[in-house]
Image (cartoon, helix red, strand yellow):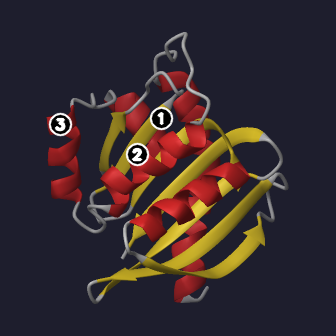
């Protein structure tokens, strides 16, 4: 497997485990639901994973300072699928969300339910508004999970470059995951 395919394959393998763990590990969302969980996910991702890409310690310090509770070990294990790291519950009135931070740098923000197209639009708008250059490098349907689509972006700002992988159910509401890694 080439390096690019290997970098993309791991988040894809984590997809099902992460979604199932999200459903089981996080408390139910509050009754009042804002109309845009996609924007909430993109905002969470920009504040966490994208802001601290490759800096697990900085991300975790931010999560603690923000008041995001760490999931118990059992919940973390499901989201990390064998990797070492920390997982924080970011569930709010918009739905169930987590931030999964691997010790070796990759970070994912995951939503239980958001419209995939809206997630892509919200992420691209947030990147644009932040002055972060981005290029769509690949878009593929998942070979194993036919309802999933993956979009890979190459992004850069201030002479720094990294990768963002967006995985989502492409027809209607479903789980969505945004991953940042150097």
Pick whichever, 71 or 178, lies toward us. Answer: 178
- Residue 94 point in image, percent of width and height: 52, 27
Which residue is found at the position 51% from the left and 75% from the top?
Answer: 7
Q: Which residue is mark 3?
A: 64
Q: Residues within 10 Å of mark 2 (few under 14, many from 20)?
A: many
**What whole-number distance in Å separates the C-alpha atoms at marks 3 and 2?**
14 Å
Quadrant of the rendering where the C terminus is positioned: bottom left
Residue positioned most to the top: 31
Quadrant of the rendering where the N terminus is positioned: bottom right
Q: Which residue is mark 1?
A: 97
Asked if disc 2 and disc 1 are in contact, CB closer than 8 Å, the reply is yes
- Residue 58 point in image, percent of width and height: 16, 56
Q: Earlier in the sequence, mark 1 or mark 3?
A: 3
- Residue 73 point in image, percent of width and height: 33, 32
Placement of 115 over or under 25, stated as above or below: below
Which residue is found at the position 32% from the left and 52% from the top?
Answer: 48
The label number, if any, that marks residue 44 in the structure image = 2
Left or right, residue 23 beside residue 131: right
Q: Residues within 10 Å of mark 1 (few under 14, many from 20)?
A: many
Which residue is found at the position 42% from the left and 31% from the top?
Answer: 75
Which residue is found at the position 74% from the left and 38% from the top?
Answer: 173
Q: Is residue 38 visible?
A: yes
Residue 172, quarter of picture: top right
Badge 1 marks a residue whose secondary structure is: strand
- Residue 171 point in image, percent of width and height: 83, 47
Asked if disc 3 and disc 2 are in contact, CB closer than 8 Å, the reply is no
Q: Is residue 83 visible?
A: no
Q: Earlier in the sequence, mark 3 or mark 2?
A: 2
Badge 2 marks a residue whose secondary structure is: helix
């Amino acid at each position: 497997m080439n390096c690019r395919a290997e970098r993309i394959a791991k988040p894809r393998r984590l997809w099902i485990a992460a979604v199932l763990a999200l459903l089981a590990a996080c408390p139910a969302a509050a009754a009042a639901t804002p109309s845009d969980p996609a924007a909430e996910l993109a905002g969470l991702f920009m504040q966490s994973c994208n802001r601290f890409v490759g800096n697990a310690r900085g991300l975790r310090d931010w999560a603690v300072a923000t008041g995001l509770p760490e999931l118990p070990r059992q919940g973390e294990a499901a989201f990390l699928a064998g990797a070492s790291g920390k997982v924080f519950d970011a569930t709010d009135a918009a739905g169930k969300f987590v931030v999964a931070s691997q010790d070796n740098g990759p970070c994912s923000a995951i939503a239980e339910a958001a419209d995939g197209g809206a997630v892509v639009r919200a992420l691209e708008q947030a990147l644009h508004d932040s002055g972060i250059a981005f290029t769509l490098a690949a878009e593929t349907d998942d070979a194993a999970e036919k309802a999933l689509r993956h979009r890979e972006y190459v992004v850069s700002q201030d002479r720094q470059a990294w990768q963002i992988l967006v995985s989502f159910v492409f027809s209607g509401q479903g789980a969505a995951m945004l991953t940042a890694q150097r």
